Image (cartoon, coloured by chain):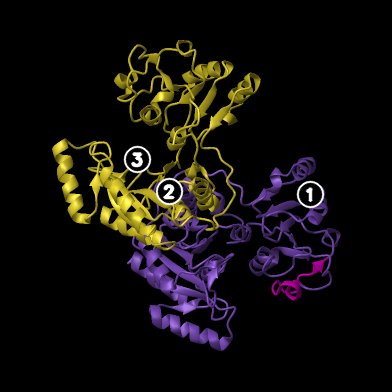
Chain colours: A purple, B yellow
Amino acid sequence: MSATSNRRMVILTDGHSNPLTAKTACSVLRYCQDEVVAVLDSQAAGQTAAQLLGTGGNIPVVAALDAAPEAKTLLIGIAPPGGKIPGHWRPVILQAISRGMTILSGLHEFLSEDQEFSAAAAAAGTELVDVRKNSETDVANRIGLRSDCLRILTVGQDCCVGKMVTSIELTRDLIAKQHQAEFVATGQTGILIAGNGCPVDCVVSDFISGAVEKQILAAQDHDILCIEGQGSLAHPRYSAVTLGLLHGSVPHGMVLCYEAGRKAIHGMPEIGLTDLATLKDAYESAARLMMPSQVIGIAMNSRLLSAEQAEEERKRIREQFQLPVCDVFRHGPSELTAAVLELKQQIQG
Amino acid sequence: MSATSNRRMVILTDGHSNPLTAKTACSVLRYCQDEVVAVLDSQAAGQTAAQLLGTGGNIPVVAALDAAPEAKTLLIGIAPPGGKIPGHWRPVILQAISRGMTILSGLHEFLSEDQEFSAAAAAAGTELVDVRKNSETDVANRIGLRSDCLRILTVGQDCCVGKMVTSIELTRDLIAKQHQAEFVATGQTGILIAGNGCPVDCVVSDFISGAVEKQILAAQDHDILCIEGQGSLAHPRYSAVTLGLLHGSVPHGMVLCYEAGRKAIHGMPEIGLTDLATLKDAYESAARLMMPSQVIGIAMNSRLLSAEQAEEERKRIREQFQLPVCDVFRHGPSELTAAVLELKQQIQG
């Protein structure tokens, strides 16, 4: 699930160090802590990553690259609205390039298409890695999928509800329980964490299912694939991405993810959410057009709730759906893991 | 529905003049006959377009560009598997460029990214138009859609069943009946016919619904939009395109298109078709995630059937679905037109 060698990263969040804007930084700190040397925020130097961003333990926050001479990678740690690099970051990025550091970015605006950065990188002989950049042009063929490699896709009520985190936590728990499981990354943060993957939202529409299928074929030497979901079938902007991923990965089972307390589509406050029961049906019907598949559990993101409220919500959803329900952080993923293993037994019969 | 000025086209099909490979040529001959000066096929010079391709009336087939001095556009008339230009076409295309003709192409491989063609076009000051090329980067917003502009989307059991043709025939019939209708093109051939449109299958997945919405907003000065559908919700390769188009265009009604007698997915003979009843439910459920919408009629492509078989099939499907059913060529589209106008009355109260 992690990159093959230690990337020794400095994560750049300078001036944008809050958990929402710096979501990428937080996820990489959470899941690749051993590979992070420092967080760069000139206004917060001296703090720890945990103090600044709520995760990352004692990793130091530094004011400048010079404070991390051992670093060999600079990671752009934010996903700003509009996808543009803040102007005052340019000198830091150029300094990293001139030091020969690899630059890692998940932005929609590609560093490698920025004239100043690409000229500097060419001169320094270093690499600008835009994880969203791709040139996928293969269609899906539905040939060669291993029937006994269990594919579990996270699906959601909306964006930003915890699909990536659920897939990763499931994978880790399965591995801890001695199963050959693999996290399959499909979005920029997942790819930064896994060290590989396919940025499906940036693939040309005709080729999204093909790009996903290629990734599944490459990963199915494992027994269980936990595939990172994207968007929602009910999202007015991104439902095409969701269906391309669903039909490209033809999952045996799905985990439905939602955030308790959310009322409207993320970023579209005037558009209400589709209820979970309707969505469960929608995912199962859409999946069935390719292969029968069921929602086997529900991942509840309860960050807006107190412990007591979370218990009530969990009980309510359990009763409504008669399925395992948990917040993978609050309760751990073991109920979902058990559902995955039960399905594995069924398909391997 | 047609381009604003006469493009005076020569359609290049040289050596590939059969109705399947030259699908683009045939559709343009059918719907833009007034704009076509000649078909170029050196092996068939002297015939008429109708003799060579089954449509296009007395438009001459010529052996070389010199036989059509009045032409000002060269249209690449085929969609070859793999999307590559046949090698022996290059001299003809270069000759057209040097004559100052505009080159129109719907291929996946862009002429404007071919070094030889783009250098020649720059020297001649002429234009290479790749209708599939786009740089869409806007997401859908669901703001500003006219509630009393009726949106009708064709949806299908598969690719290549007649969705574009159904949308065009409906539009023409509505216009003939004095309605303000517009064909909204979403694929390369539709765009070549309409003179504008959005090649949705070539848009990056995150932006497909946004690109469609933009097109709808631009066209809704008309009262009825007949939107060209793409692919199928049950297509293993292209379902993402279909859903992005469905959710970007939020249709009030849909016309379900199929080819009688087809058994398997076009180009994937090992994958059987999903039955029409299941698909009707799938389209209505998927549409309902954004806005209630129903299949209001069925367009049957009966080219594989005799007249008698077609009548039997029509009767059978009518009884099964209790909906208008017709082959828009064999029976004309008037039953579907009536269903559209009935829905128009409903939404406009």
Q: Amino acid at mark 3?
A: Cys
Asked if residue A311 lies left or right of residue A49, the reply is left
Q: Residue at x 24, y 53 (%)?
A: B323
Q: Nearer the viewer, residue B88 or A33?
A: B88
Q: Answer with the quarter of the image where residue A58 lies.
A: bottom right
Q: Nearer the viewer, mark 3 or mark 1?
A: 3
Q: Position of residue A146 (x, y in %)?
A: 39, 55
Q: Nearer the viewer, mark 1 or mark 2?
A: 2
Report, in whole angstroms, how far the alpha carbon at label 3 lies from the one at label 1. 50 Å
Start-end of magenta stretch: A49-62
Q: Nearer the viewer, mark 3 or mark 2?
A: 2
Q: Would you say residue B81 is visible in this rendering?
A: yes
- The lab-note entry on whether marks 3 and 2 share a chain reads yes
The correct choice, above or below, for A104 with respect to B22 in the image is below
Q: Amino acid at mark 2?
A: Asp
Q: Amino acid at mark 1?
A: Ile
Host chain of mark 2: B
Question: At numbered mark 1, what does the secondary structure look like: helix, strand or loop?
Answer: helix
Q: Position of residue B89 (x, y in %)?
A: 48, 20
In the rendered image, which residue does mark 2 sit on? B223
Q: Quadrant of the N terminus of chain A?
A: bottom right
Asked if residue A115 lies left or right of residue B229, the reply is right
In the rendered image, which residue does mark 3 sit on? B160
Q: Would you say residue A148 is visible in this rendering?
A: no
The correct choice, above or below, for B306 with respect to B240 in the image is above
Q: Position of residue A212 (x, y in %)?
A: 48, 52
- The lab-note entry on whether marks 1 and 2 share a chain reads no
Instruction: Say the numbered circle drawn on residue B102.
Output: none
Q: Nearer the viewer, residue B154 or A292?
A: B154
Sooner in the amino-acid sequence: mark 3 or mark 2? 3
In the rendered image, which residue does mark 1 sit on? A97
